[in-house]
Image (cartoon, rainbow, N blue to C red):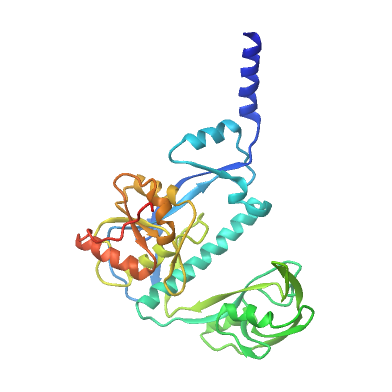
Amino acid sequence: MLASTLMLIALLCAGVFLPVPYSEMSPGPTVNTLGDHDGEPVLQIAGRKTYPTDGHLNMTTVRVTSADYRMNLVEAVYGWLAHDNKVVPHETLYPDGKTEEESTQENAEEFSQSQESAKVAALKELGVPVESWVIVSTVVKGSPAEGRLHAGDVIRTVDGKAVKEPGDVAELVTEHKPGEDVVFTIVPAKEQAAAEKEKRAPKKTERITITTATSEDGGEKRAIVGISAGTDHTFPFTIDIKLADVGGPSAGLMFALGIYDKLTPGSLTGGAFVAGTGTIDDDGKVGPIGGIEMKTVGARGKGAQYFLTPADNCAAAAKDTPEGLTLVKVDTIDDALAALKDIRSGDTDGLPECTAS
Protein backbone atom coordinates (compact mmCIF):
# COMPACT_ATOMS: atom_id res chain seq x y z
CA MET A 1 0.00 0.00 0.00
CA LEU A 2 2.84 2.37 0.87
CA ALA A 3 4.54 1.65 -2.45
CA SER A 4 1.31 2.28 -4.34
CA THR A 5 0.74 5.56 -2.48
CA LEU A 6 4.27 6.75 -3.23
CA MET A 7 3.84 5.81 -6.88
CA LEU A 8 0.58 7.75 -7.05
CA ILE A 9 2.22 10.81 -5.48
CA ALA A 10 5.10 10.55 -7.98
CA LEU A 11 2.68 10.36 -10.91
CA LEU A 12 0.71 13.36 -9.65
CA CYS A 13 3.92 15.36 -9.24
CA ALA A 14 5.02 14.39 -12.73
CA GLY A 15 1.64 15.47 -14.09
CA VAL A 16 1.88 18.86 -12.40
CA PHE A 17 5.52 19.65 -13.11
CA LEU A 18 6.30 17.78 -16.33
CA PRO A 19 5.96 20.15 -19.33
CA VAL A 20 4.46 18.79 -22.54
CA PRO A 21 4.88 20.16 -26.10
CA TYR A 22 1.31 21.37 -26.46
CA SER A 23 -0.60 24.65 -26.49
CA GLU A 24 -4.25 25.46 -25.95
CA MET A 25 -6.83 27.28 -28.05
CA SER A 26 -10.08 28.60 -26.59
CA PRO A 27 -12.90 30.92 -27.70
CA GLY A 28 -11.80 34.55 -27.76
CA PRO A 29 -13.75 37.82 -27.77
CA THR A 30 -16.21 38.69 -30.53
CA VAL A 31 -16.64 42.28 -31.68
CA ASN A 32 -19.54 43.83 -33.61
CA THR A 33 -18.01 45.59 -36.62
CA LEU A 34 -21.10 47.82 -36.73
CA GLY A 35 -20.72 48.90 -33.12
CA ASP A 36 -18.23 50.38 -30.67
CA HIS A 37 -15.18 48.89 -29.01
CA ASP A 38 -13.41 50.52 -26.07
CA GLY A 39 -15.62 53.58 -26.43
CA GLU A 40 -15.21 54.33 -30.14
CA PRO A 41 -16.72 53.01 -33.39
CA VAL A 42 -14.91 50.04 -34.88
CA LEU A 43 -15.47 51.38 -38.40
CA GLN A 44 -14.88 55.11 -38.88
CA ILE A 45 -15.65 56.52 -42.34
CA ALA A 46 -15.07 60.15 -43.35
CA GLY A 47 -15.57 61.90 -46.69
CA ARG A 48 -18.48 59.72 -47.80
CA LYS A 49 -22.11 59.54 -46.76
CA THR A 50 -22.86 56.75 -44.29
CA TYR A 51 -26.16 55.31 -43.15
CA PRO A 52 -27.50 54.10 -39.79
CA THR A 53 -27.71 50.36 -39.34
CA ASP A 54 -28.57 47.81 -36.66
CA GLY A 55 -28.04 44.19 -35.77
CA HIS A 56 -24.68 42.48 -35.49
CA LEU A 57 -21.91 41.58 -37.90
CA ASN A 58 -19.48 40.17 -35.38
CA MET A 59 -15.91 39.20 -36.15
CA THR A 60 -14.65 36.33 -33.98
CA THR A 61 -11.30 35.45 -32.43
CA VAL A 62 -9.41 32.61 -30.82
CA ARG A 63 -7.43 32.93 -27.61
CA VAL A 64 -4.15 30.95 -27.49
CA THR A 65 -1.53 30.28 -24.85
CA SER A 66 1.70 32.26 -25.24
CA ALA A 67 4.79 30.94 -27.01
CA ASP A 68 6.76 30.82 -23.75
CA TYR A 69 4.07 29.02 -21.77
CA ARG A 70 4.54 25.28 -21.37
CA MET A 71 1.51 23.26 -20.39
CA ASN A 72 1.90 20.46 -17.89
CA LEU A 73 0.40 17.03 -18.36
CA VAL A 74 -2.60 17.71 -16.12
CA GLU A 75 -3.52 20.87 -18.06
CA ALA A 76 -3.16 19.04 -21.37
CA VAL A 77 -5.46 16.21 -20.26
CA TYR A 78 -8.01 18.71 -18.92
CA GLY A 79 -7.87 20.61 -22.22
CA TRP A 80 -8.43 17.42 -24.24
CA LEU A 81 -11.47 16.60 -22.12
CA ALA A 82 -12.93 20.13 -22.10
CA HIS A 83 -15.57 20.70 -24.79
CA ASP A 84 -14.85 24.36 -25.49
CA ASN A 85 -11.04 24.14 -25.61
CA LYS A 86 -8.64 22.48 -28.01
CA VAL A 87 -5.13 21.24 -27.26
CA VAL A 88 -2.77 21.24 -30.26
CA PRO A 89 0.97 20.64 -30.75
CA HIS A 90 2.94 23.75 -29.76
CA GLU A 91 4.53 23.95 -33.23
CA THR A 92 1.07 24.28 -34.79
CA LEU A 93 0.73 27.76 -33.28
CA TYR A 94 4.41 28.69 -33.22
CA PRO A 95 6.14 26.95 -36.16
CA ASP A 96 9.89 27.02 -36.69
CA GLY A 97 10.52 28.03 -33.10
CA LYS A 98 8.95 31.48 -33.50
CA THR A 99 9.03 33.68 -30.44
CA GLU A 100 5.92 35.39 -29.14
CA GLU A 101 7.22 38.73 -30.45
CA GLU A 102 7.76 37.32 -33.95
CA SER A 103 4.34 35.70 -33.98
CA THR A 104 2.69 38.90 -32.73
CA GLN A 105 4.43 40.95 -35.43
CA GLU A 106 3.39 38.52 -38.15
CA ASN A 107 -0.21 38.52 -36.91
CA ALA A 108 -0.23 42.33 -36.83
CA GLU A 109 0.97 42.48 -40.44
CA GLU A 110 -1.67 39.97 -41.54
CA PHE A 111 -4.34 41.92 -39.66
CA SER A 112 -3.30 45.15 -41.37
CA GLN A 113 -3.35 43.50 -44.79
CA SER A 114 -6.76 41.98 -44.12
CA GLN A 115 -8.14 45.44 -43.34
CA GLU A 116 -6.82 46.78 -46.65
CA SER A 117 -8.31 43.88 -48.60
CA ALA A 118 -11.62 44.27 -46.76
CA LYS A 119 -11.81 47.92 -47.82
CA VAL A 120 -10.97 47.10 -51.43
CA ALA A 121 -13.46 44.21 -51.61
CA ALA A 122 -16.27 46.32 -50.13
CA LEU A 123 -15.64 49.29 -52.43
CA LYS A 124 -15.37 47.07 -55.50
CA GLU A 125 -18.71 45.56 -54.58
CA LEU A 126 -20.12 49.10 -54.44
CA GLY A 127 -18.55 50.06 -57.76
CA VAL A 128 -16.23 52.62 -56.14
CA PRO A 129 -12.86 52.82 -57.99
CA VAL A 130 -9.73 52.09 -55.97
CA GLU A 131 -6.21 52.86 -57.24
CA SER A 132 -3.72 50.03 -56.61
CA TRP A 133 0.00 49.39 -57.12
CA VAL A 134 2.60 46.74 -56.29
CA ILE A 135 4.90 47.33 -53.33
CA VAL A 136 7.70 45.65 -51.44
CA SER A 137 5.83 43.99 -48.60
CA THR A 138 8.75 42.50 -46.64
CA VAL A 139 12.52 42.22 -47.01
CA VAL A 140 14.27 39.09 -45.74
CA LYS A 141 17.07 39.76 -43.29
CA GLY A 142 20.46 38.90 -44.75
CA SER A 143 19.13 38.73 -48.31
CA PRO A 144 20.59 40.61 -51.32
CA ALA A 145 17.69 43.10 -51.13
CA GLU A 146 18.38 44.09 -47.51
CA GLY A 147 19.35 47.76 -47.40
CA ARG A 148 18.59 48.18 -51.11
CA LEU A 149 14.82 47.80 -51.13
CA HIS A 150 12.51 48.71 -48.25
CA ALA A 151 8.98 47.83 -47.19
CA GLY A 152 6.57 50.23 -48.87
CA ASP A 153 8.74 50.91 -51.95
CA VAL A 154 6.53 50.91 -55.06
CA ILE A 155 7.81 48.51 -57.75
CA ARG A 156 7.23 50.05 -61.17
CA THR A 157 9.29 47.71 -63.35
CA VAL A 158 11.65 44.74 -63.14
CA ASP A 159 14.27 44.73 -65.90
CA GLY A 160 12.20 47.37 -67.67
CA LYS A 161 9.07 45.22 -67.73
CA ALA A 162 5.97 46.74 -66.11
CA VAL A 163 4.78 45.14 -62.88
CA LYS A 164 0.99 44.93 -62.55
CA GLU A 165 0.48 42.16 -59.98
CA PRO A 166 2.58 41.01 -56.99
CA GLY A 167 3.17 37.67 -58.71
CA ASP A 168 4.87 39.45 -61.63
CA VAL A 169 7.87 40.29 -59.43
CA ALA A 170 8.82 36.71 -58.56
CA GLU A 171 8.14 35.60 -62.14
CA LEU A 172 10.51 38.20 -63.57
CA VAL A 173 13.23 37.62 -60.96
CA THR A 174 13.22 33.85 -61.51
CA GLU A 175 13.82 34.36 -65.23
CA HIS A 176 17.41 34.99 -64.11
CA LYS A 177 20.00 32.49 -63.01
CA PRO A 178 21.41 32.82 -59.46
CA GLY A 179 24.26 35.34 -59.47
CA GLU A 180 22.83 37.47 -62.27
CA ASP A 181 21.76 41.09 -61.81
CA VAL A 182 18.15 42.20 -61.78
CA VAL A 183 17.14 45.85 -62.10
CA PHE A 184 14.21 47.31 -60.16
CA THR A 185 12.64 50.68 -60.93
CA ILE A 186 10.96 51.89 -57.76
CA VAL A 187 9.29 54.85 -56.12
CA PRO A 188 10.84 55.05 -52.63
CA ALA A 189 8.36 54.54 -49.80
CA LYS A 190 8.93 58.04 -48.40
CA GLU A 191 8.28 59.66 -51.78
CA GLN A 192 5.12 57.61 -52.26
CA ALA A 193 3.85 58.59 -48.80
CA ALA A 194 4.56 62.28 -49.50
CA ALA A 195 2.80 62.09 -52.87
CA GLU A 196 -0.29 60.53 -51.29
CA LYS A 197 -0.36 63.14 -48.53
CA GLU A 198 -0.02 66.00 -51.01
CA LYS A 199 -2.39 64.34 -53.50
CA ARG A 200 0.10 64.46 -56.37
CA ALA A 201 1.95 62.02 -58.61
CA PRO A 202 5.32 60.79 -57.31
CA LYS A 203 8.20 62.88 -58.64
CA LYS A 204 11.11 60.59 -57.81
CA THR A 205 12.02 57.12 -59.07
CA GLU A 206 15.18 55.07 -58.54
CA ARG A 207 16.90 52.23 -60.42
CA ILE A 208 18.23 49.59 -58.05
CA THR A 209 20.46 46.76 -59.31
CA ILE A 210 20.56 43.65 -57.13
CA THR A 211 22.60 40.48 -57.64
CA THR A 212 20.36 37.46 -57.18
CA ALA A 213 21.07 34.69 -54.68
CA THR A 214 20.28 30.99 -54.83
CA SER A 215 17.27 29.32 -53.28
CA GLU A 216 16.52 25.61 -53.42
CA ASP A 217 12.86 24.69 -53.78
CA GLY A 218 12.23 20.95 -53.90
CA GLY A 219 15.81 20.40 -55.05
CA GLU A 220 15.50 22.94 -57.85
CA LYS A 221 17.74 25.99 -57.69
CA ARG A 222 16.22 29.36 -58.53
CA ALA A 223 17.17 33.03 -58.32
CA ILE A 224 15.84 35.23 -55.53
CA VAL A 225 16.48 38.71 -54.16
CA GLY A 226 14.80 38.20 -50.78
CA ILE A 227 11.56 40.19 -50.92
CA SER A 228 7.87 39.46 -50.94
CA ALA A 229 5.61 41.69 -52.99
CA GLY A 230 2.19 42.96 -52.00
CA THR A 231 -0.40 45.51 -53.00
CA ASP A 232 -1.11 48.99 -51.65
CA HIS A 233 -4.08 51.19 -52.42
CA THR A 234 -5.34 54.74 -52.42
CA PHE A 235 -8.96 55.12 -51.33
CA PRO A 236 -11.22 58.00 -52.45
CA PHE A 237 -12.24 58.62 -48.83
CA THR A 238 -11.06 57.63 -45.36
CA ILE A 239 -11.91 54.28 -43.80
CA ASP A 240 -10.33 53.56 -40.41
CA ILE A 241 -10.70 50.29 -38.52
CA LYS A 242 -10.15 50.81 -34.80
CA LEU A 243 -9.52 47.50 -33.10
CA ALA A 244 -6.50 46.86 -30.88
CA ASP A 245 -5.03 43.61 -29.56
CA VAL A 246 -6.28 41.53 -32.48
CA GLY A 247 -4.10 39.80 -35.06
CA GLY A 248 -4.27 37.57 -38.10
CA PRO A 249 -6.24 37.82 -41.34
CA SER A 250 -9.47 36.08 -40.37
CA ALA A 251 -11.64 39.17 -39.77
CA GLY A 252 -11.45 40.30 -43.40
CA LEU A 253 -14.91 39.13 -44.45
CA MET A 254 -16.70 40.69 -41.49
CA PHE A 255 -14.88 44.01 -41.91
CA ALA A 256 -15.84 44.09 -45.59
CA LEU A 257 -19.50 43.44 -44.77
CA GLY A 258 -19.47 46.09 -42.04
CA ILE A 259 -18.04 48.69 -44.43
CA TYR A 260 -20.59 47.75 -47.09
CA ASP A 261 -23.43 48.02 -44.57
CA LYS A 262 -22.41 51.49 -43.39
CA LEU A 263 -22.11 52.78 -46.97
CA THR A 264 -25.54 51.54 -48.13
CA PRO A 265 -29.06 52.48 -47.00
CA GLY A 266 -30.88 50.07 -44.71
CA SER A 267 -29.59 47.20 -42.61
CA LEU A 268 -27.80 44.17 -44.03
CA THR A 269 -28.88 41.95 -41.15
CA GLY A 270 -32.42 43.24 -40.58
CA GLY A 271 -31.53 43.36 -36.89
CA ALA A 272 -30.36 39.73 -36.68
CA PHE A 273 -27.25 38.67 -34.77
CA VAL A 274 -24.84 37.43 -37.43
CA ALA A 275 -21.24 36.47 -36.71
CA GLY A 276 -18.61 35.00 -38.98
CA THR A 277 -15.02 34.62 -40.03
CA GLY A 278 -12.87 34.26 -43.12
CA THR A 279 -10.02 35.92 -44.92
CA ILE A 280 -10.85 38.02 -47.96
CA ASP A 281 -8.83 39.11 -50.95
CA ASP A 282 -9.18 42.24 -53.07
CA ASP A 283 -11.64 40.49 -55.37
CA GLY A 284 -13.94 39.36 -52.56
CA LYS A 285 -12.85 35.71 -52.41
CA VAL A 286 -13.31 34.25 -48.91
CA GLY A 287 -10.57 31.96 -47.57
CA PRO A 288 -10.34 29.45 -44.70
CA ILE A 289 -9.06 30.20 -41.21
CA GLY A 290 -7.87 28.31 -38.13
CA GLY A 291 -9.74 27.57 -34.92
CA ILE A 292 -13.19 27.45 -36.51
CA GLU A 293 -14.63 25.31 -33.67
CA MET A 294 -13.53 27.88 -31.08
CA LYS A 295 -15.04 30.73 -33.08
CA THR A 296 -18.47 29.15 -33.45
CA VAL A 297 -18.58 28.44 -29.71
CA GLY A 298 -17.56 32.02 -28.89
CA ALA A 299 -20.11 33.47 -31.32
CA ARG A 300 -23.00 31.40 -29.98
CA GLY A 301 -22.01 32.26 -26.42
CA LYS A 302 -22.52 35.94 -27.28
CA GLY A 303 -25.92 35.29 -28.85
CA ALA A 304 -25.21 34.78 -32.55
CA GLN A 305 -27.98 33.11 -34.56
CA TYR A 306 -26.11 32.74 -37.85
CA PHE A 307 -22.42 32.17 -38.56
CA LEU A 308 -20.92 32.98 -41.98
CA THR A 309 -18.45 30.13 -42.53
CA PRO A 310 -15.76 29.85 -45.22
CA ALA A 311 -16.59 26.96 -47.54
CA ASP A 312 -13.30 25.21 -46.76
CA ASN A 313 -14.06 25.29 -43.02
CA CYS A 314 -17.62 24.03 -43.31
CA ALA A 315 -17.00 20.32 -42.76
CA ALA A 316 -14.92 20.88 -39.61
CA ALA A 317 -17.36 23.43 -38.18
CA ALA A 318 -20.41 21.24 -38.83
CA LYS A 319 -19.00 18.31 -36.84
CA ASP A 320 -19.85 20.05 -33.58
CA THR A 321 -22.20 22.96 -34.25
CA PRO A 322 -23.34 24.79 -31.10
CA GLU A 323 -27.07 24.39 -30.53
CA GLY A 324 -29.10 27.27 -31.93
CA LEU A 325 -26.43 28.40 -34.40
CA THR A 326 -26.91 28.08 -38.16
CA LEU A 327 -23.67 27.71 -40.13
CA VAL A 328 -23.96 29.45 -43.51
CA LYS A 329 -21.50 28.43 -46.21
CA VAL A 330 -19.86 31.32 -48.10
CA ASP A 331 -17.15 31.36 -50.74
CA THR A 332 -17.27 35.03 -51.77
CA ILE A 333 -18.57 38.35 -50.49
CA ASP A 334 -21.43 37.95 -52.97
CA ASP A 335 -22.40 34.69 -51.23
CA ALA A 336 -22.40 36.49 -47.88
CA LEU A 337 -24.54 39.36 -49.18
CA ALA A 338 -27.03 36.91 -50.70
CA ALA A 339 -27.25 35.02 -47.40
CA LEU A 340 -27.78 38.26 -45.47
CA LYS A 341 -30.59 39.21 -47.85
CA ASP A 342 -32.36 35.95 -47.00
CA ILE A 343 -31.75 36.42 -43.28
CA ARG A 344 -33.18 39.92 -43.13
CA SER A 345 -36.21 38.89 -45.20
CA GLY A 346 -36.85 35.88 -42.98
CA ASP A 347 -36.62 33.52 -45.95
CA THR A 348 -33.92 31.25 -44.48
CA ASP A 349 -35.04 27.85 -45.81
CA GLY A 350 -32.74 28.17 -48.79
CA LEU A 351 -29.63 29.21 -46.91
CA PRO A 352 -26.57 27.13 -47.96
CA GLU A 353 -25.88 25.47 -44.62
CA CYS A 354 -22.63 23.67 -43.78
CA THR A 355 -22.65 19.88 -43.54
CA ALA A 356 -20.15 17.55 -41.91
CA SER A 357 -19.48 15.61 -45.12
Residue 107 against residue 89 in the figure, above or below: below
Report the side of 12 relative to 276 (left or right): right
Q: Residue furthest right?
A: 179
> What quarter of the picture does the N terminus occupy?
top right
Q: Which residue is drawn at 63% across and 51% down?
A: 100
Can residue 268 be seen in this snapshot? no
Q: Residue at x 41, y 71 (%)?
A: 284
Residue 234 against residue 242 in the figure, above or below: below
Q: Position of residue 141 (x, y in %)?
A: 73, 66
Q: Which residue lies furthest to the top in this view?
A: 1
Report the side of 154 relative to 51 (left or right): right
* Quarter of the figure with residue 268: bottom left
**Depth check, front residue: 224 or 238:** 224
Can residue 162 be seen in this snapshot? yes
How many marks can you see?
0
Q: Where is residue 200 in the image (x, y as percent from the top left)?
A: 53, 88
Residue 21 against residue 329 in the figure, above or below: above
Q: Residue at x 34, y 70 (%)?
A: 334
Q: Position of residue 16 (x, y in %)?
A: 61, 28
**Depth check, front residue: 163 or 189:** 163
Residue 36 against residue 113 in the figure, above or below: above
Q: Where is residue 87 in the image (x, y as percent from the top left)?
A: 53, 42
